[in-house]
Every structure is written in C-alpha cells, then in structure tokens.
Image (cartoon, helix red, strand yellow):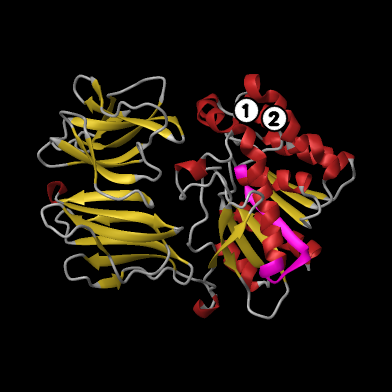
Amino acid sequence: MYVYDLETRVSRCVFETDDTNYAAGFSADDRSVFALRMHTNVNADLFLVDIESGDALHLTHHQGDAHFSHPRAAADGRMVHLITDLDSEFARLATLDLETLALTYLTDDLWDVEQLEAAQGGKRLVYSVNEDGTSALFVLDRDRTGGARRVEGLPVGTVVDFDLSKDGAHVDVTVSSPLHAVEVWRVALDRGDVWRLTFASEGSVPHDSFVEPELIAYPSLDGLMIKAYYYKPKGDGPFPVIVDVHGGPEGQSTNLFPALRQYFVQCGYAVLAPNVRGSSGYGRTYLHLDDVRKRMDSVADLAHAVDWLCEHGNARRDAIAVMGGSYGGFMVLAAVTHYPDRFAAGVDLVGIANLRTFIENTSPYRRHLRECEYGTVEADGDFFDEISPIHHVDRITAPMIVIHGANDPRVPISEAEQIVEALQKREHPVEYLRFEDEGHGVVKLPNRIKTYTAIAAFLDRYLK
C-alpha cells in the first residue's frame, strides 16, 4: 500500500504483505492509514497502519465471516465510524472505539448499509441503504436527538456514489434510475432542497420510452421466495423474454438504469433480472444458500423463474433466453444443460464452463477469494465434474452465443474455448466472439458495439 505526496509527487510503500489489501482512508491526524484486508469476498479485516513506522494495529479481531468497510475517523481520534455485518444478517452502521476496539451499532439489522461518508469531524454521517434493491439515503447527526432522517426528493433508483461537502451542508449523489439514466443530484441537507447538476446525453432516445421495472417474487423448488426485477415492453404480449443473470455470485440486480435492458425492452422483449439464492442484499443466510455443494439450487431458481414467467409474466414459453456474464455466464451454461427444456437461446459472456479448470487456471490472487464460495479441487473436484456444463454439452438444445476476452485473468479464455469446441464438434448452432484486446468483459466502445449488435441479431434470429 502506497502513500502519494501531492506536493512532492513522490510515492512510497507504507504497508506490504502477501494478502489482498486496499487503502481505506486516513486517520484523523493523517499520521496513519486504514488498510482493508480481504480474506474472501465476505470476510475482511481492518488495520490501522502508521505511515512512518509501518506498524499495523489489527482493529477487528473476529471469528467466522465478517466484513468491514468505509472507515471514517472522528475528529477526536478516539473512534471510527464504519460498516460491518459482524454478528448480523445485514451490513450495519457502527462506531469502533480505537482504545477498547468495542463496536456500537447505529442502525438496525434490516437491510444492508452500503456506503458511508462523514463531515463535521464525524458529527454528521450520511449513508445509503439497499432496501430490496432500491437505495435510500439517510442523514444522522450524532450531536442531535431524533435518530437518522431519510433524504427525500431523489429519483427512485440505485445510489452509485456520493460526496459529502467538508462542512456537511450538502451532498452530491450519483443516482442510476430507470427513468432518469445516470445523473448527479445535489441535496441541501438542512433545507431539504434537491436539484439536478448534470444532464447526461440520452442520445435520440425519447425519455418517456424508458421503462420502470416491477419488483416481483416467485417461489422456487423449496418454497424460497426469489426477488426479481421485471421489465415489460408496451403491448399485449405474450412477449419473448430475456432472463438476465447477474455475476458474483454475490452480486445483486438492483433498481438502476441498465441501458442494454432498456434497449431490448424497446425491441419488444421483456427482461427478468432475478436475484437467485446466493445474491447479496438479502442477508447473510441468503448469501450462503448456494455455497459449494448447494450450487445447483441457484440454477433451479432460474428454472422456476421460467415457470413464473409463463404463468404470471405473459411470456412466450417457446421464446425465453438466458443471458449472463462471468458467474452469470456459468449460470447460463448450467441452465441450458440442466434445464434444456426451459430455454430457447443462451448468451454466455466470459462465463465458466468447467469449475475444475476454472479454479486451477484463474489467477492465484483470485483463487483464495473464490474457493470459499465454489470449493476446492482437492475436496470438491468430483462435484465440479458432476455439475460443470462442459460435461453435459450433449443436453444443450438452445442455440448459443459465446463472448470472451483473450486476456481475462479471472475466467481464462480456455473456458470459452472448451464450450465452443464441444458445441462445434456436435455441429450445434454456436456463435463465438473472441476479442484479443479485452479481458474480463467487453470494455472498449468498438468491441461493445460489435458485441451488443451480435447479441441483438442472435436473439432476433432465434426468439422472434
């Protein structure tokens, strides 16, 4: 971890270990820096590192999984505000006493607190809460009674980021909203005034054509209710549908502005974005429901999504595609191999075809972060072989399109090559886009245009 001097333009290393460490902010006197150490995606620790000596004080001793983030030091230097899910279902706002290392929670164990900023020496806190995939912003004045108050007047959507002024008088909030795209809004926290700061280009797309999704819930194989956002086009239907699966697997589909989904809705497709078991945002227990040998229960959630679409979503049963990237790509391949009768097409972006080779070949810095979720080759290799899509290619009936970057350090290009080669040997309909100048995802604009054009043409060919 490095500290960069803005005046001398010199950087120097102040903390180095063989772990995954992130700089997380300065102490009140700027003599120390908080270091976030990630053991896994759901287990972390905070250290306070002295910039001069490099000595590190471990602040968050704990047993089991617990995550700590967003440390914000109070002016007196005796406490730090942070977000943690220690001993809780959800991530909560808390204070940590830097002398006793005792935690005091400031929010209830109901929804995840996701972001935090502090002003006025820690007397004013602004934080966002993920309430069923939609963000709410709160202000907590520590020197006043009455508790936190909700910020009103922002568009309904997902808070991407926010910046609190040094005096705490206003906060600039980036909101991704289905009806407003991605814009920055300013809130005067004491007066309550809200005004829009940016007017991002929406191209030639009429604003009133944007679709706000419906939050729905459907039962899965064991009665567990799965939440999802459902975007429906205008018209009577029945509609062709794209089931859009998020990555992670600890990710979450939230109430934001997804340009690609909005495009497909304008083309007459409905889009369902499910938060299958294992998604974040619904508590610690839900997050672990797909760990290791429970993996296929989350794939069953996709099959039951199709059942809901046909019974309640006005969907064409013969025109339902599944699409996803990264771990979502694995879900696509698992869905079309284990539930081939449910899906008419599959779109796999940088997905995993073989869990064994994925764990063996992913970058070493990623492997230890992933094994707690997927398992290890030594202990679970037989299970990997049992469920991996590459070993069930003969079951696939849906046409496929596979997209991957040759420089992917997370999901190696060999995962795409395996599934494409197996499909081609069977003379099964498969389209393949390999980008030599991309990694884990498609980032460059010309490549994105090529990718989305190919996906749209592919889906039109097989679903319409």
Q: Amino acid at mark 1?
A: Ile
Q: Is residue 2 left or right of residue 210?
A: left
In the picture of the structure, the residue carrying the numbered disc 1 is 359
Where is residue 266? Give x, y as percent. 63, 73
- Closer to viewer: mark 2 or mark 1: 2
Where is residue 184? Give x, y as percent. 35, 64
The quarter of the rendered structure image containing the N terminus is top left
Q: Residue at x 9, y 39 (%)?
A: 76
Q: Residue at x 46, y 70 (%)?
A: 201
Mark 2 secondary-structure assignment: helix
Q: Residue at x 49, y 68 (%)?
A: 178
Q: Amino acid at mark 2?
A: Phe
Q: Nearer the viewer, residue 97 or 460?
A: 97
Q: Residues within 10 Å of mark 2 (few under 14, many from 20)?
A: many
* Main secondary structure found in the magenta portion: strand
Closer to the chain start, of discs 2 and 1, is: 1
| Outermost front residue | 223
Q: Is residue 112 left or right of residue 144?
A: right
Query: On the image, which quarter does residue 383 sit in?
Result: top right
Mark 1 secondary-structure assignment: helix
In the picture of the structure, the residue carrying the numbered disc 2 is 384
Where is residue 206? Give x, y as percent. 53, 78
